[in-house]
Amino acid sequence: MAETNGSSSPPTGTTGSGTPEPPHAKRMITFWLIISLVVDVLYYTLAGPHMPPGDMTSAASGAQFDLNILMICALPVILGVWTYLGYALYNFREGRPGTLLTGPMAHGNFRLQVGWMVGTTVLVLGLFVFGTAELIIPAGAGGGEGPDPIWTPTSHTVLPIQVIGQQWKWTYRYPTYGGFETTSLVIPDNTTIAFHVTSLDVIHDFWAYQLGIKADANPQQDNVAFTTTHQLGQFTVRCDELCGLWHGAMYGFGHVVTKAAFAAWATRTEAQLAANTKLLPPFQWTYVPDANGADGGYYPDNVDPYSKVEIYGAQKAKV
Amino acid sequence: MAIDTTAPEAPLGAAPPPAAPAPHRPVWLQQNVLTAIVLAVAGFALGHWAGNRIAGGYPNVAGASGENEVAICLSLGLGVLGWLLGIGALNYPIAKMFGREAIQEPYNPSWTRFFKFSTDHKVVGVQYFFGVITFFFTAGLLAMAIRTELLYPTNHLIGPGTYIEIVGEHGTMMMMMASSAVVGPLGNYLVPLMIGARRTAFPRIEATSFWLFTAGYLVILTALPFGGFPTGWTGYAPLQTQASGGMDSYLVGFAVIGLGMILAGFNLIATIIHYRAPGMTWARVPVFVWSILATSALLALATPTLVTAGLFGILDRTAQTAFYVNERGGSSFLWENLFWFFGHPEVYIMALPGFGIVAEILPVFTRKPVFAYRVATAGMFGVALLSFFVWQHHLFQSGINPDMRPLYMLTTELISIPTGFIYLVTLGTLWRARIRFEVPMLFALGMLFNFLIGGVTGVFLSDVPVDVTVHGSFFVMAHFHYTIMGGLIFALFAGIYYWTPKVTGRQFDQRLGKIHFWCMFVFFNCTFFPLFILGLLGMPRRVFTYAANLQFLNDFSSVSAYLLGTSFLIFVANFIWTIVIEPRPAPANPWGSLGLEWQTPTPVPYYNFERIPVVMNDPYHYAEADADPVADISLPPPAVAMNRPPAAQAIEP
């Protein structure tokens, strides 16, 4: 809801008594303008730089900037209503000396109503234009964009990493390094990354908090999210879509390392896991959901996931 | 203006009681809640037997823990049918089907009418009140269990399995309860009184909606013995397809409750459109009735999607269809879309009646007309209409229709415009008023405070880049608790404190009421405000474990939640003491309201109005000495007198 500062010009009514009313509206607006300015400035300078999700990547700093702008718009709205409520409840309460015996019979106020509607509409449309720009310019703002993203990064060197969700763990495949699969998420600094998120069973949601990345892991669906890393360090990964019993335990950590360290790690891991990679299904963007994901199996094997009997053409799960 | 001063036929058609009362049936043949329980149990057993006979040999319909899904679904379905048969909800259609007249029990004013199938809208309202309170407290206890588990980041008091069951059960029960929280008790009780009608349009349908509501409560409770459901209230497939027997309770329960919601919605729509008294023009309809009309429209139009989606889910689990199974040609996106196409109008089903109550109550306690009445109705219908065009904002990160995200961001943010109308109306009504801080007024003001925070945080969620951080986190959870609990439930309590003197003729202790308000208001905010911060700090919803540095905020929220739960005990004690044990008689019109409902005698007679009132003004002309009275309920309506023989108007309560 976005009541604007339309609350600034309250309705006028006919007074029931002859005593002149104090300038309520002027007092409220003055107080509201001052307090809004103070709170907004304090927020932006003190809290703003520390707001989540931080500035580890382009998507994160974009989301932080967006959050701060929204807060700067929202705080005056909240303060406006609070100012009005506080002022009205104190000054217009029954039994206060000088209270009107009969309130003014304002059934409406055309100018105020139109002003309110125009004000809220302008604010809302402004937020919409701003939000859309913040979504499109940074290539989807770190959110999942489906299999064919229409807003893509300008960089031509994008590192693809496949994120595979299954009950209840995350694994990662690096297609540019032979498609090895690992439980460690390591990404290079100052690089644009394309996370290709998919699932082997139910819907999960890949949430790399400090990277500003969130994308649903849907079975048989490739969901792409982009970001560009800016800082070295550790980040948290959590599953953000309820996926069953151990959903709460489906978390882990990833690391942003230097490009050289990443290259060394990836080459070394590729060699170490070469024997495993041969056993994996060939790298694909999606996999047929696996019957035994929850039971500890890793790989699709064409078994019907929800039934205890074989269906036509199915192979028995390898135990 | 559809109906002006000409009297509609319908209100009087309802009036005369049966000339020769039907023979009194012996006690053991009377239908009440006991016969309903007996037949429900019988239906449950029959369904279980039949299900095992039909599908016992098919391992495909065995769930994860080996139970037969067909047997569970059939037993729940036949149990509900038995419940309806036992209470007598189907007597009339069955008798008509065989070309006979249904036996109609004579009106019996004893307390036993509350345990029977009653077509008196006032009895249904009171039944709904106790049903909603039971629902609310059951789900509230589950919330206490959730907060207890979250006291420690890694030590587990109830464990992940029970935790996920309780989270799903709490969410589903609260959503089911909140859909009818105001429409059920207050809507059914007050709408006919407010529009000058003697009954609702379809009393049998109205009563059936209540007994479906109770059946839904029982069905969703059976999820616990069946092992619960792991999906939360959103029931996402394919987790839904994978889940064990408790999932059937979820799907059948939502279908049953949904059917009741559709029926309740249609009944109230027809009542409000056709049963308004002469002179009750659209411009004189109370704001509360407008809000119920908008809500009923949503109930009737959105809920069928839920029932259909649930039916697909039941078919997937029993008949082995593949609506939501990706690898057999279905789509897990289908459930997400169907569910939220219902789910987003649903959240306005839970918000609009709150707006209505607050806008209805404020003029009474400010002694002023409601400010910008037409803007209020436009706001409510604007919200209702737009609510059908926003559902995909729940799927911003899902990867479906990524290029449509700006559109859904726009429609979602547009909703804040009509919502803002409600604030214009309520704040305008406070302007230079004479404000009395009675208990209902305090709850109404509390609703304005809470819903403001809930609404503004909704704009954050609608903004896609910010949503990347807050989607699915505790931020969302705090947001919708601020709108539903802080908005609807606060408004509901405003309504309970406000209209109880009308319903019971008894008055709550006002001091205890104020203590209840302040405890509930303070501890509500202490419970849910920290959850915004937790969400921003990266805590996802529905997790049983979290980062150790978030423990303080979680513990603060948990302790506040216990105190919030305790504050309801003050209400219960107040209710039991001053309404039941030591009744305090209320004045006829304790708040000095102009509303038509306050002009009937207390307790309200069976036929509400001795004569159909002629409405002459809207009920908001406070402190206007020269305003017309709201209605003349003593004169026989001239238009009616011309059309009807006088005998038809005589009422024998």
Image (cartoon, rainbow, N blue to C red):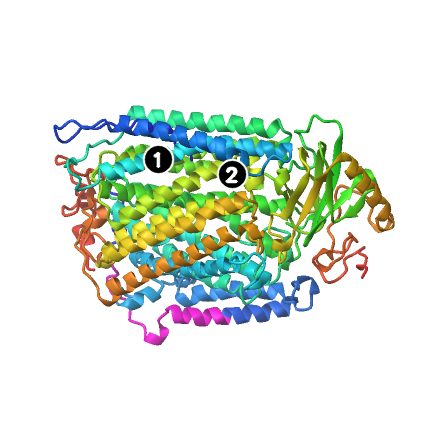
- The percent position of residue A249, horizontal first and vertical second, equals 63, 55
Estimate the x, y position of residue A313 in percent, counting from the top left. 81, 55
- When asked about the image quadrant of residue A234, the answer is top right
What kind of element bears circle 2?
helix
Q: CA distance from mark 2 to mark 1?
A: 21 Å
Quarter of the picture containing the C terminus of chain A is: bottom right
B267 relative to B77, above or below:
above
Amino acid type indicated by mark 1: Val
On the image, numbered disc 1 is attached to which residue? A81
> x%, y% of residue B598?
21, 49
Kindly identify the amino acid type of the residue bearing the numbered disc 2. Answer: Leu
Q: Is A48 situated left or right of A293 in this image?
A: left
Q: Which residue is mark 2?
A: B461
Mark toward the viewer: 2 or 1: 1
Give the letter of the chain under mark 2. B
Query: Where is residue B505 drawn, in percent x and y?
Result: 21, 58
Rendered position, A26 above or below B10: above
Between A88 and B124, which is closer to the camera in this rendering? Answer: A88
Q: Nearer the viewer, residue B586 or B315?
A: B586
Query: Does the stretch in magenta take in A43?
Result: no
Q: Secondary structure at mark 1?
A: helix
Residue A70 appears in the figure: no
Pick the quarter of the image with the N terminus of chain A: top left
First to last magenta residue range: B17-42
How many marks overall? 2
Q: Is residue B196 left or right of residue A124?
A: left
From the viewer's side, name the closer residue of A87 and B437. A87
Q: Residues within 10 Å of mark 2 (few under 14, many from 20)?
A: many
